[in-house]
Image: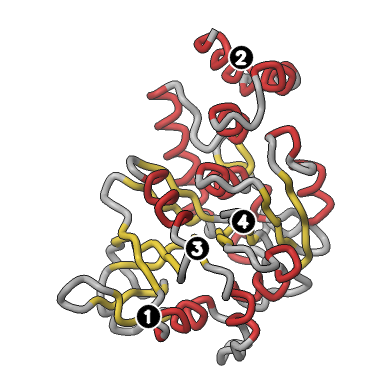
């Protein structure tokens, strides 16, 4: 399947003011990389090479300057504007022409995923031809999230957005896999009380059809939301700790593209030479040296 990816990197980022008064939240650094590198890398790890970045009219130029057309990573990047926040499901209205009749995957631009077994679960979801797949993550306080309800056999029977009385501790994370129906189903949605097209409403459409699957992320997987000053700092500290301890980078698009065979050693060396002053390029050159 030629599954296409979408990174939703819009919004005003008001919870991060004054940091985001003049720059998109997804362009802020999370330790040694721009935030958008992390969700973009997840789509690449899941095997997607055609990706749409949806952002604001103000910020599109900055994303183009940072990411280009994706060719240096062996992928294709397109861009679209979200003039004002209209809900996560609006991504499938904006991205309809890009998706066409293909299956797709939406990931939020401020979500970071990392951990054991994650790539396998992503690939399983990517290979599922029919229906929708969401990922559940156990959290201590599920009230701020979309929350899954399960029957005694562990099957999803309900999804509720920001419930006052959550029926489980499994929050639905910011990555969603859909089949070819998604744009048509999104077009049938009506705005919620807050005037947005809710992703939970879209997922409930699939649930009503008996076509919603939920993959539970294990205790060895980290899911980080970087929407506040505190969570942004925590995410940066987490990435720093793991990278310095292991000597391996988390969500490095250049490394992923190289390991996937989308770029060769010569192409990686050219990228590395342009980044050596920051130390990031030295890491890429070390990859080549180890493989050599």
Along the line of sight, the residue nearer the viewer: 73 or 87: 73
Closest to the camera, between mark 1 and mark 3, is 1
* Disc 2 element: helix
- Residue 275 is situated, as x and y percent measured from the top left of the image, at 71, 22
How far is the residue under mark 4 from the one under mark 2?
A: 29 Å
For mark 4, what is the residue? 5
Q: CA distance from mark 2 to mark 1?
A: 49 Å
The residue identified by callout 3 is: 177
Q: Which circle marks residue 210 in the picture?
A: 1
- The image shows residue 38, relative to residue 99, as above or below, that is above
User: Alpha carbon of mark 1 to alpha carbon of mark 3: how far?
Assistant: 15 Å
User: As rendered, which of 32 and 233 lies closer to the eye?
Assistant: 32
Circle number at residue 87: none
Cβ–Cβ under 8 Å for marks 4 and 1: no
Q: Secondary structure at mark 4?
A: strand
Q: Do the residues under discs 1 and 3 have CB atoms within 8 angstroms?
A: no
C-alpha separation, residue under disc 4 versus residue under disc 1: 24 Å
């Amino acid at each position: 399947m030629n599954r296409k990816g979408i990174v939703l990197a819009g919004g005003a980022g008001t919870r991060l003011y004054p940091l985001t008064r003049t720059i998109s939240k997804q362009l802020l650094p999370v330790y040694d990389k721009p935030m958008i590198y992390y969700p973009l890398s997840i789509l690449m790890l899941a095997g997607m090479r055609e990706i749409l970045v949806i952002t604001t009219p103000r910020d599109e130029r900055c994303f183009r300057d940072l990411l280009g057309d994706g060719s240096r990573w062996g992928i294709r990047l397109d861009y679209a504007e979200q003039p004002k926040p209209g809900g996560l499901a609006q991504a499938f209205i904006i991205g309809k022409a890009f998706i066409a009749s293909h299956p797709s995957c939406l990931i939020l631009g401020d979500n970071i995923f990392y951990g054991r077994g994650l790539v396998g679960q992503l690939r399983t979801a990517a290979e599922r031809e029919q229906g929708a797949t969401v990922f559940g993550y156990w959290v201590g306080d599920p009230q701020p999230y979309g929350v899954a309800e399960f029957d005694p056999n562990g099957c999803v029977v309900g999804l509720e957005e920001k419930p006052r009385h959550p029926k489980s501790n499994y929050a639905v994370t910011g990555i969603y896999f859909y089949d070819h129906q998604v744009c048509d189903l999104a077009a049938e949605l009506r705005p919620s009380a807050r005037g947005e097209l809710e992703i939970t409403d879209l997922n409930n459409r699939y649930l009503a059809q008996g076509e919603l699957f939920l993959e539970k992320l294990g205790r060895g997987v980290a899911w980080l939301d970087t929407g506040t000053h505190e969570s942004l700092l925590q995410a940066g500290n987490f990435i720093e700790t793991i990278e310095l301890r292991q000597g391996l980078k988390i969500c490095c698009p250049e490394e992923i593209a190289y390991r996937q065979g989308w770029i060769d050693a010569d192409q990686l060396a050219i990228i590395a030479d342009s980044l050596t002053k920051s130390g990031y390029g030295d890491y890429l050159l070390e990859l080549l040296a180890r493989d050599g």
